[in-house]
Amino acid sequence: MKKIGVLTSGGDSPGMNAAIRAVVRSSVARGLEVYGIYDGYKGLVEDRMVKLTRFSVSDMIIKGGTMLGSARLPEFKEPEIIDKAVDILKNRGIDGLVVVGGDGTFRGAQALSERGIACIALPGTIDNDIAATEYSIGFDTALQTVIENVDKLRDTSSSHHRCSVIEVMGNRCGDLALYSGITTGAEIIITSDSEFKLETVIEKLNYFDLVKQKNHAIVIISEKITDVYQLAKEISKQTGFSGRATVLGHIQRGGSPTAFDRLLATRMGDKAVERIVEGFKSECICLVNNEIVAVDINEALNTPEPNRKQLVELHERLV
Amino acid sequence: MKKIGVLTSGGDSPGMNAAIRAVVRSSVARGLEVYGIYDGYKGLVEDRMVKLTRFSVSDMIIKGGTMLGSARLPEFKEPEIIDKAVDILKNRGIDGLVVVGGDGTFRGAQALSERGIACIALPGTIDNDIAATEYSIGFDTALQTVIENVDKLRDTSSSHHRCSVIEVMGNRCGDLALYSGITTGAEIIITSDSEFKLETVIEKLNYFDLVKQKNHAIVIISEKITDVYQLAKEISKQTGFSGRATVLGHIQRGGSPTAFDRLLATRMGDKAVERIVEGFKSECICLVNNEIVAVDINEALNTPEPNRKQLVELHERLV
Amino acid sequence: MKKIGVLTSGGDSPGMNAAIRAVVRSSVARGLEVYGIYDGYKGLVEDRMVKLTRFSVSDMIIKGGTMLGSARLPEFKEPEIIDKAVDILKNRGIDGLVVVGGDGTFRGAQALSERGIACIALPGTIDNDIAATEYSIGFDTALQTVIENVDKLRDTSSSHHRCSVIEVMGNRCGDLALYSGITTGAEIIITSDSEFKLETVIEKLNYFDLVKQKNHAIVIISEKITDVYQLAKEISKQTGFSGRATVLGHIQRGGSPTAFDRLLATRMGDKAVERIVEGFKSECICLVNNEIVAVDINEALNTPEPNRKQLVELHERLV
Amino acid sequence: MKKIGVLTSGGDSPGMNAAIRAVVRSSVARGLEVYGIYDGYKGLVEDRMVKLTRFSVSDMIIKGGTMLGSARLPEFKEPEIIDKAVDILKNRGIDGLVVVGGDGTFRGAQALSERGIACIALPGTIDNDIAATEYSIGFDTALQTVIENVDKLRDTSSSHHRCSVIEVMGNRCGDLALYSGITTGAEIIITSDSEFKLETVIEKLNYFDLVKQKNHAIVIISEKITDVYQLAKEISKQTGFSGRATVLGHIQRGGSPTAFDRLLATRMGDKAVERIVEGFKSECICLVNNEIVAVDINEALNTPEPNRKQLVELHERLV
């Protein structure tokens, strides 16, 4: 009987457990034996894994985090490390692998598939930074966590003529900032796509304060663009608003996945097993035109970033 | 300057306020005057409306329900009623209308457009029963409300070897039951598509209890299929589980919209105004292949129901 | 070394796991061995129990339901059943027991203590129907679940000039209805203390509709007082509101406990172990004047119901 | 007819709106006229206020923040400023005032009462730093917000063998840290009562990692004790855990109040009006032994901090 492995790698995202559950149950339903590999590629090269049954994943669809653990292993591109992983898998008779993670994880899968291990990758990242898929597993939950917290800041901001500056995750990809900014009615959205100029922010805020008579303002900004605590200080100094910064941080990675992420993860996990059974070797599962499809990993890794111009204009039109 | 009206009709759904906000702000941004019509077509034929500014809709994006109110007016197909509405709109110089609601609302828009009023309809229903769009405004929020409650029932069910029977909304369209069933790991899903047989349910439950050794079971069923309190009694009688029924009811219509619904409503509302400005007269805004597009209303009303066979099989494979 | 047992009995309530965790860890810290008994008194007379360590209860403080399971065993007053339980405990060398549940559970503890088993009872019920304690474990969480759902119904009620009738748990004790009614600004609260008259409800609603010009109304009613679906129908018939009924049911028993319940359960569980170590034999742990105290079980069972007159008047004054 | 004013001052806390609602409706019910004063004492000395009716506060019981706005006015102890406030109130014929806030707010009330204005103060602060009352309005909601976020961090921490360091509000009073630490099962709690030593934290964490084999750890720390980002770095360096810091910040002030805070605010607001009507001049409303009572302001301001030794020991026993 065919044996496959499943692992989660890189930063965790809500829905990874739902994906693991789907991979396990879909494998069992299709007559495969499935092994859970601990802590991503790190656990793989250390040969740490356990056989999973349909019972091992009971109730997992509702849980945040990843039951298999996750880790980063930057060295997982060096030939000897890859070879070691291949040997371990071959010794165990595992000829297929489903990996869940971001593009680093995808590259690992690519390397393994080049050495004959059938690898199917699922996009699991809260940043939505896999251009090949419309949504990655965890993005919707992280987005929901962000807007619920921004809604709370709105209460207290409007009580104090305050400007709340909220830093969200996603540097290379600004979707968390852009989507949460639009859906919370934020006055200003700053991502790595839009160049950041302090003067511009101050100018806009003074306009919202003096011309538009807003009694509070919300600024949402992607991580690693500027020191938001400093930015808040400048806002207090140069505008009528008193600035306050909040860094949401790792809260965005936690929580029970939304229905959207549970379904996405479940469909993708099932599809991955289907593709392995059908003999495909180097693919990533994506949501394209609202359909679950398989895309060649190289192709997926080279998909150009989508253009968010329309959404940016939408925000400017409605703010 | 061009004047348009906006109304919400039929059962309310979370995100209607976000849609109203988008219509108002997008209109103002494009130089239109916009009137909010109270209580749907009922308020229209009673000439109850108010001018809305961008301030009228501040903070509305996060609020459940509809600030304009909603009502059902079955008579809104009789020629004289339609004529009355047309006269009222003409007297006020309103030549365009954005309506948010279900298919009844769409038919009203169709009738008005046939008499020369430009009407753009947005799908606002928690049932996701507008086949022309992949998702309707409010479905994602209702689905989230359902799974959060089912997750709570899971706690208590597993403490008592119980079978929880949960009735959700959506009779003509079983999406709420099907999607929530898959995303909560429900043992059994019953919709109007799958014929309901008591014996089959009992048989399956006994299988889960005796063969699969599950210590609790969840059954999700669409409204108007059977008396769920009676069904729970039969389960207690004929299986090892003690059955308990819960009818979620109108809770499913309430709550602050999810990020997904806020974005969908915002994009659709903006698109509707764009189409009116471009001179289109009888369309509905839909999400197709994850894009916001305009579809002719007649076409939209005649779109065949999507086939959910794949999702049903997915559920059976993983349960 | 001393051995004790812990069990949860009757209807489950959020915080029971936090109580079990506290009992286990406090026992280990005080050098006792502790056994978890499955499914309440039923599991006890069937001698189903397992040794628990501090690891067995990791992460349990945040989980709803009860990890030990719960059941009702009405026969657990018949002498031979009690004797059987005592024999099982003696054979295992267990001379102390902590039980969590409602007054039925307390009576069981009383019977056991009369036969020489040291029993300390914790009030675990969402109904808050143990008069000896200001709050029982689970009440605050159930109350929070109720108000979050009523807040959702408020959105949709006000969109349709509707009267939402919500049935909550707690028949003998109306606290869930009274407290949720006050904290959601419900127009009418009906408990077993206030006699129910349809005419009065209709009269009040017409007053709120016509005189006070309210555009929606909320009625909260305790279970087992009247058929709420019928009541909603009458409201639609006899008032300007369209009535809609919701039965919250078992949702009220689920969910992660609130901070209040986690703390209450933790303090009570620890106190119970302290009392057993100190050699007390037949007590219940209560919150009195905001202090955790031990009360003789007989005394606790005979404490008269608190008078809620002040809260009822407060509601009438502010509605 | 008697006229009174109501204001919220200092940092806002969830439940202030519920308190305002109770003050307004209780006043109307008792035949008083009531004015809402904007932005605390600042708005008072600027004579910015509006008459409130029972309709002005509809639906306010569920809203976070404060509808009247709040501000800090440190100068509100200088005689001439106080005199100005007194003159403004006298000119308007307002002879009573209900203020909601922290101890700074209480001192303002004290000063006003010394000049003949009847002042009743309500404790509204998320820090629970008013020793005279068992709970202040907003504490329970802030605590709930903290534990929900810590529960989310737990998911992701356990996926990465991580130590999450969470900074919560409350410097002078460590209750938010202590209560949230106990109710989330945090490994380490650091407040201004417990002296902070880096070595001790590192030592404990290494013990949890190596001896207790915990796969993640949570450290909760009050604000203004140390740089938590720096602390997280040290943890990564000196322990087996990778440290991550989160500063919850103003999120803790927002959100719809819990049932507990809604009830507390409602009872306190009603009591304040009762006391004014009865002619009392300088009191603060407190929760003592779970009863709503009135305490002389001087007395309240001089109540010694409660001793949290028992709770600290409880945490150490169970961790």
Image (cartoon, coloured by chain):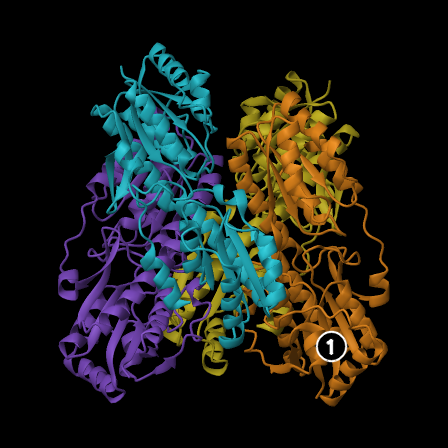
Chain colours: A cyan, B purple, C yellow, D orange
Q: Quadrant of residue A47?
A: top left
Q: Is residue B150 left or right of residue C38?
A: left
Give the quarter of the figure containing the C terminus of chain A.
bottom left
Residue C111 visible in the snapshot: yes
Q: What residue is disc 1 on?
A: D97
Q: Position of residue A138 (x, y in %)?
A: 41, 42
Disc 1 residue type (three-letter): Leu
Q: Position of residue D124 (x, y in %)?
A: 69, 63
Residue B317 visible in the snapshot: no
Give the quarter of the figure containing the N terminus of chain A.
top left
In the displayed structure, B172 sits above or below B235; it is below
Question: How dense is the environment of label 1, judged by Cα within 10 Å: few (below 14), some, or many (20 and up)?
Answer: many
User: Of helix, strand and loop, which one carries label 1?
Assistant: strand
Q: Quadrant of residue A245?
A: bottom right
Of the pair B230 and B317, the residue shown nearer to us: B317
Q: Quadrant of residue D294?
A: bottom right
Q: Position of residue A9 (x, y in %)?
A: 43, 30
Of the pair B107 and B230, the residue shown nearer to us: B107
Residue at the image point whose x is 17% and y is 75% from the top? B113
Residue at mark 1: chain: D
Residue at the image point whose x is 50% and y is 31% from the top? D159
Residue at the image point whose x is 24% and y is 77% from the top? B96
In the displayed structure, A306 sits above or below D117; it is above
Q: Position of residue B249 (x, y in %)?
A: 37, 56
Figure label count: 1
